[in-house]
Structures are given as C-alpha cells and as structure tokens.
Image (spheres, rainbow, N blue to C red):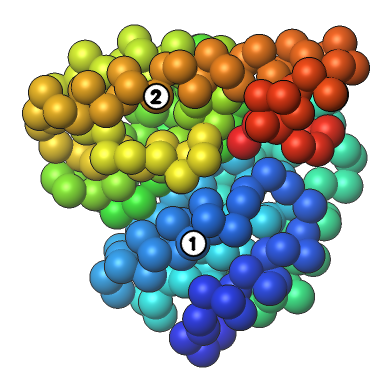
Amino acid sequence: MPSPTTFEEAFAHADAIPGWLTRDQAAELFRLAAAVPPGGTIVEIGTHLGRSAVVLGLAARPGVKVVAVDPFLPDWRYGRADSQALLRENLAKAGVAGRVEVHAVTSEAARATWSGPVNLVYVDGGHSYWACRDDLGWASWVPADGHVLVHDAFSSLGVTTALLRHVLPSSALRYAGRTGSLATLVVGRPAFRDRARFIGQLPWWLRNLVVKVLLRLRLRPLAAVLGHRGQADPY
C-alpha cells in the first residue's frame, strides 16, 4: 500500500496521464479525498486512463476504499480498445493498483448493486442529460456534509441541464463552488445564497458553449478573444 504522499507528488504521477483534469481541479479532488476517514469510500464515475483515479488513490488514507467505475466503451469520442489495460498500467506505475478497485461496468449497473455509504463521489461519466441525471443518483448514498464533485458542470449542455433540473431546485444538495468546470456539491439543505451562486455561473456556461461552437467551426482566433486557449473544449 502506498505511503502518504503530497499533492505535488500525486499530481506529478497524474500529469503524465492524458485526460481533462486541471492542476487546480486535481488539488480539489486530492483535498477532499484526503479528508475521507479510514473505513470510508470514494467512488469515481468515469475513469478513462486514470488521471483522476491516480490522484484519488494517492490522496486516500490507508483503509479508504477507492472504486473506479467505467464501462470502457471503445465507441465514444475518446474511447479506445485498450483503455482499461492502460488504466491498470497507469495505476500500477503510481503504486495504487492495489488501492483502486476497477469496476468495468456502467454507472447505472454499479449503483443498482451498491450498498453502504459513500463519503465522496466524483462524477465525470457520460455528458448527456440522462447520463448525468443517473450519475447524480449516487448522491443518495452520500451522508450529510459529504461531497459530490461533477466535472464539466459548466461546459456541457447535457451536464449543466441535469444540474439545473436536479440540483438547483434540490432540497438535499447545495452548490458550494467550482474549480474551472468542476462543481463541488455538498449533501445538505441549500440556502438561497447557494442557489444564487449556482445561477451566477450560467453566463460562464454560455460563454463555454459559444467557445465549443467556435472550436467546431475551426475559429480558434475568435475563441481566443473569449479567453480560451488550446484545441480542447473548456474544462
């Protein structure tokens, strides 16, 4: 089992793995994962090649179970036939192969057979409204004051729509802030200011949708005018 590590050490491992997790987002994952007490559980929905799973695995204290759920479908935009093999290789390189349980099933299938509390859920699965809606169902396993993190919360039409429909009016989840597109939700009754902060992110979401259209049209100079750099979608 790996010895305790710093965020800098964890991110050095993770940053060598392709994926869509910024340094600041990784720091948020590391902070919350490190706070899970021994005997607790962390669930990640959408693992791909392990960039975030390595952060979670290295942050988790001994005795904390980390479960990575991904069906490893080869037919999505960034899918590949060897994704699961590469994930396991990356986990081994980081020294967390024995700490991170890989469940090669859909989020829906994993949740259907799940039992027991989950201290931290990280959602980065399918980005359709329906997929995100179903993934948010994991919050039912999270106790009061536990955390649900949602990636691409304000850079995807489907994900943001699901949050607007199922989190903004919720009496059981409150919006605590974002790191880039990574939204931090806390299990608990929201106050008016929590809902207001959530609504305040919508202009940034609309900006990101415009950037994505410009990138599809190969108009990167116009996207740069909006402050976006690089070829990848905002995240």
Residue 100 circle label:
none
Location of mark 1 (residue): 27
Q: Residues within 10 Å of mark 1 (few under 14, many from 20)?
A: some
Rendered location of residue 85, percent (x, y) = 82, 55
Residue 232 visible to the viewer = yes
Q: Label 1, label 2: how many angstroms apart (C-alpha)?
A: 21 Å
Rendered location of residue 117, percent (x, y) = 26, 49
Residue 101 visible to the viewer = no
Q: Label 2: state its secondary structure.
A: loop
Q: Hey, what amino acid is under mark 1?
A: Ala
Rendered location of residue 55, percent (x, y) = 56, 64
How many numbered discs, if any?
2
Rendered location of residue 81, percent (x, y) = 89, 40
Q: Label 1: state its secondary structure.
A: helix
Quadrant of the rendering where the N terminus is positioned: bottom right
The quarter holding residue 218 reads top right
Residue for point 40% across, 80% down: 62
The image shows residue 225, relative to residue 1, as above or below, that is above
Q: Which of marks 1 and 2 is nearer the N terminus?
A: 1
Q: In this view, does 161 lie to the left or right of 18?
A: left
Q: How crowded is mark 2: few (under 14 residues within 10 Å), some or many (20 or more)?
A: some
Q: In this view, does 149 lie to the left or right of 157?
A: left
Q: Hey, what amino acid is under mark 2?
A: Gln
Q: Are marks 1 and 2 in contact (CB under 8 Å)?
A: no
Please identify the residue farthest to the bottom as the structure is shown: 3
Residue for point 10% across, 28% down: 191
Residue for point 47% across, 86% down: 4
Location of mark 2 (residue): 201
In this view, the mark in front (1 or 2): 2
Please identify the residue farthest to the front as the structure is shown: 225
